[in-house]
Amino acid sequence: MILLKNIYKAWDGTPVLNNISLDIEEGKIFCLVGMSGSGKSVTTKLILGLEKQDSGQVIIDGKDTSGFSEVQWRETLGKFGVVFQNAALFSSLNVFENIGIRLLEEKRKPKPVIREMVADSLVKVGLKPEIMNKYPDELSGGMRKRVGIARAIIHKPKYLIYDEPTTGLDPVNANLIDKLILDIDLEEAGITSIVITHDFHTVAKLNSHIVMIHDHRIYFSGTTSAFMNSQDGVIRTFLSR
Ligand SMILES: Nc1ncnc2c1ncn2[C@@H]1O[C@H](COP(=O)(O)OP(=O)(O)OP(=O)(O)O)[C@@H](O)[C@H]1O
Ligand SMILES: [Mg+2]
């Protein structure tokens, strides 16, 4: 379980997150939404230890991360898979190397085993293992996104974070990614999916707990249907864009 307790984060005296508390339950989909610049990515960075809060606590699996040593961080980050915005693939590496990068660097498994693991994760995201030898430039945007997801799930993470998984995709590919998020959630037993998005189509399809950050605070916390049916002006504006 991931808990954020009364998080305050400011830059140059300007608050970005003001008293944010989140409760990300295990084995479910959690959706974090908000307009551009509302602090969604900063929230993920705090969870992953890439930024430090000014006050408040981030608690992962019962442990307060504020005093974590490097070893504790490494151990904790091993539980996470992150699908970065724009897939963030290395253009000089082929699909096999992009997905297997950590396993190849660790050198703990023989290459044929890694090849099989990469093939498995490609199949899981609906791609043919044959594309292993292709380079990111040779793939469509939708395929690159899938490769990014394959890279995140190969280590069987407990927590899978998607940062804007459908941004920049056409509606057909965006729909396919939404479906893939649901499929992975079903197939990877016990996985906790954290979906950060400002795509209300994604929000509508993922039947999950939704938290909306607005004006640096938690503006809404509740179910998909309560969110979609809300008559609140700010939420209606978010949903109508
Ligand atoms: N390192 C930093 N230094 C100063 N300000 C920052 C820093 N990182 C983020 N911010 C500010 O924090 C605010 C929230 O940024 P964040 O990237 O979390 O927004 P977001 O909700 O992810 O937006 P988007 O939907 O566009 O991705 C922005 O105003 C941004 O300028
Ligand atoms: Mg962001």
Image (cartoon, rainbow, N blue to C red):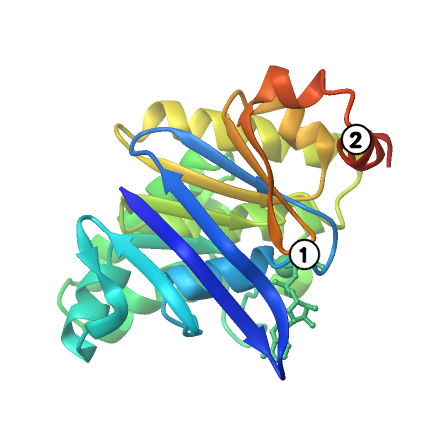
Kindly identify which residue carries mark 2.
Answer: 239
Query: Which amino acid, mark 1?
Result: Ser
Q: Is residue 180 visible?
A: yes
Q: Earlier in the sequence, mark 2 or mark 1?
A: 1
Measuring from the top left, give residue 70's x and y in whole percent: 20, 79
Q: Nearer the viewer, residue 71 or 17?
A: 17
Q: Is residue 17 above or below residue 231?
A: below
Q: Residue furthest bottom?
A: 12
Q: Nearer the viewer, residue 65 or 74?
A: 65
Measuring from the top left, give residue 106's x and y in whole percent: 20, 72
Measuring from the top left, give residue 11's x and y in whole percent: 60, 79
Does residue 38 appear left or right of residue 4 in this picture?
right
Query: Which amino acid, mark 2?
Result: Leu
Cβ of mark 1 under 8 Å from ligand 1: the answer is yes
Q: Is residue 10 above or below residue 167?
A: below
- For ligand 1, which image quadrant applies? bottom right
Dot 1 crowding, Cα within 10 Å, few <14, some 14–19, many 20+: some
Q: Is residue 88 above or below residue 20?
A: below
Q: CA distance from mark 2 to mark 1?
A: 16 Å
Kindly identify which residue carries mark 1.
Answer: 38
Q: Residue at x 74, y 49 (%)?
A: 35
Cβ of mark 2 under 8 Å from ligand 1: the answer is no
Q: Residue at x 72, y 15 (%)?
A: 229
Measuring from the top left, give residue 65's x and y in whole percent: 25, 65
